[in-house]
Image: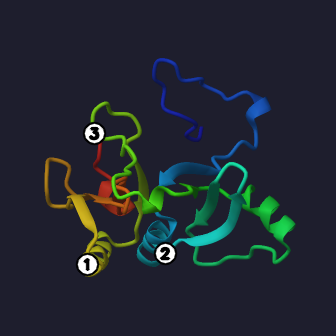
Amino acid sequence: MSFNTEQHPGVTAQPDAATRGFTLNHCMMRVKDPAVSLDFYTRVMGMRVLRKFDFPEMKFSLYFLHRSDTCDAPDDVGERTAWTFAQEGMLELTHNWGTESDPNFKYHDGNAQPQGFGHICFSVPNLDTAVAWFDQNNVTYVKRPDQGRMKDVAFIKDPDGYWIEIVEAARLKNLGR
């Protein structure tokens, strides 16, 4: 028998057939300055912008980013929109217009009190190489891989102070044993 799910209180042993095909498309985070955040997520984290939407009547923009070494998105804007919403593991950056010019504006990062949202996570092929890249780009750390009780896991901050966990899957085999 192949692995299906770990069993814990509240876990449904077998998802209902009605949920077949459901996938996690994206998570959304609000950003103060899209130029700063887009630089970080495209240059430092290697993501690509698949689609941008502007909503002038509500004064906000949405940027959908994806991490992939290949991008076979359609050129037609409507087809690319449909294709974007069929992807997995995207990050949506939401920019409420005007926040970038307010020096006192700041979003809650979810880790200060009261805690809520915690972090997103990127898996990297080599943690040491990723740490060297982050150092080269002056990325702010919450925790380096050799700090704290949980080794081989880093936490960095994006320009808005949101935490990003950085893991190398092969180093986590003994986690939770």
Q: Residues within 10 Å of mark 3 (few under 14, many from 20)?
A: few
Q: Could you tell whether 171 is left or right of 144 in the image?
A: right
Q: Quadrant of the N terminus?
A: top right
Q: What residue would you read off at disc 3? A: 112
Cβ atoms at labels 3 and 1 below 8 Å apart? no
Give the CA separation, mark 2 to mark 3.
27 Å
Task: Name the residue carrying label 1.
Answer: 132
For the residues bearing labels 2 and 3, Cβ distance under 8 angstroms: no
Question: Neighbour class for label 2 at 10 Å: few (<14), some, many (≥20)?
Answer: some
Q: Secondary structure at mark 2?
A: loop
Label 2 sits on residue:
46
Q: Identify which amino acid the numbered label 3 is placed on.
A: Ala
For badge 1, the amino acid type reads Ala
Please state which of the two labelled residues, at mark 3 or mark 1, is closer to the viewer: 3
Q: Nearer the viewer, residue 100 or 71?
A: 100
Picture disc at residue 89 = none
Query: In the image, is 49 to the left or to the right of 175?
Result: right
In the rendered image, residue 78, in percent from the top left (x then y), is placed at 86, 65
Residue 159 in percent (x, y) is at 37, 63
SS category of the residue bearing label 3? loop
